[in-house]
Amino acid sequence: MSDIIVKMEGISKAFAGIKALDNVRIELKKGEVHALMGENGAGKSTLMKIMTGVYTKDLGSMYLYNEETKRLEETEMKSPLMAQKAGLSMVFQELNLLENMNIAENIFIGREPVGKSGFLNKKELKENAKKELEKVGLHINPETPVDVLSCGQMQCIEIVKALSFKAKVVVFDEPTASLSEQESQVLFRIIDELRKEGVCIVYISHRMEEVFQLSDRITVFRNGVYIDTVQTKDVTEPDLIRMMIGREIESKIDRGNGHISSSNVILNVKNMQVYPNSTPVNFKLYEREILGFFGLIGAGRTELMRMLFGIDPIGQGEIYIKGNKVHISSPADAIHAGMGLVPEDRKGLGLILDMSIKDNMLISKLAQFKSGWLKKQMLKKITGSYISDLGIALRNEEQEVKELSGGNQQKVVIAKWLAMTPDILIMDEPTRGIDVGAKSEIYALMRKLTDAGKSIIMISSEIAEILQVSDRVIVMHEGNISGEVTAEEVTKNNIMQAAFGGGMENE
């Protein structure tokens, strides 16, 4: 019996005349974790969407192992439902839950248990959902509305939904992007159990440490073209980077010229309370500094920044910018005070998906220019510079932003706020879902901004990112600041200790 359960070869796909995939191939084996890697726009998600019936291929063939005939048979998945019934499930990078429904309803949508009367059996639905949630160690009421969940919790529900199908192949597209360290470890245990049961896992991730920890084989795409498939044990991280981007990138960034001074305080937050029972938070942001905020999900980092930016009300506390007390009760107040926010939820809060790339970037600039030729030329110059600086992969600037990959959407969000030239830029998970090459470009851009006099607050769940980018790190736990350390003092151990509420010991 062959151990290959899915084979795809000669697959090509174009959108509006632009080739997303050009004669690519992949083989998936029973009981393996197969990493699929490449820069944003390389075609990874596109191929998996073809396999799971979201897209139809233009050319090529797909074969699925038939348990009855004991051989690979050519097939085509014409819909996601057809793929799911065939044992092919996908956990998408972008959240696709229906927020007007509860957890149980989302997990079993279209598969709800029906009683003898023909009506929905709510009790059975709840029990079935509870069982699926417990499989991943998620102890939450299945009747909880989805719209009250955090991004990390929503991602976990997406995973549970995919696993609820008796899958032969499960595709995970950047599954840990919104997960805490504990949630990620739960996922890794689930993946290991699925592998032992003979399920094939396709793992799309830009996090190298995860790929090397989990995968058996790695397939690399670049610009929609198949590059190679290798055994994970036979390659190194530099090898993969060269395969993915065709060049080497710097593993470290220049931290600037040592021009950060504790006397140049641009932002001073005093006695701001994140949660009702948490200790008031006090911190300072210095001019030309990248201040990293680290913590586990529920630590209060995003909540703190939402209050600071006027999205959520401030129960108590004071905010000083450049020594002047400011009153922020709305995002408009924050913007007027010189702040910008790159949100974690780029689709829900960062973009207008049906608008063009250009209009998303320049929505704050449109009123600044009079109509006419000059306006068009100035706006085109601005958008062109950001497209170039951020390496945004697109057909043209009039393309709707919803058509971009997740990573390129995030770049548009960053460009939008950079166009507003804030003095303080809050970046919540700025490289979530962004490939290794683009990360390097964004890090360099962040440093370029601080060199120009800007100050950045960066929330990140990636320890490697925190260690690499931050001039100073603040760690939060349950709404409190549990540790603060400079770049010279920060280590993985001391920030993780603080993240779990144990305080911080400098090594």
Image (tube, grey):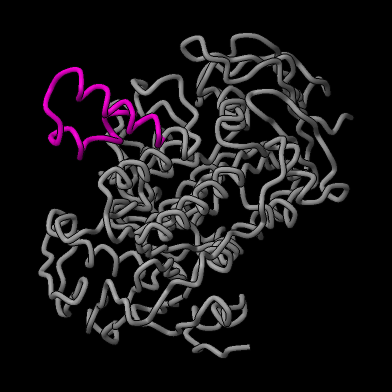
Of the pair 358 and 2, the residue shown nearer to us: 358
Q: Main secondary structure of the magenta part?
A: helix
Q: In the rendering, at what x and y percent does residue 117 appear?
A: 30, 36
User: Is residue 142 shown in magenta?
Assistant: no
The stretch drawn in magenta includes residue 362: yes
Residue, x 40% and y 49% (percent of image)? 124
In the rendered image, the quadrant that contains the C terminus is bottom right
Residue 109 appears in view: yes
Q: Quadrant of residue 395?
A: top left
As drawn, is 348 to the left or to the right of 3?
Answer: left
Residue 500 position (above or below residue 113): below
Q: Magenta residues, as a range?
A: 357-386
Image side of residue 22 versus residue 478, left or right: right
Query: Which image quarter holds the N terminus?
Result: top right
Determine whether 355 is above or below 75 in the image.
below
x and y, in percent, of residue 354 in the image: 28, 27
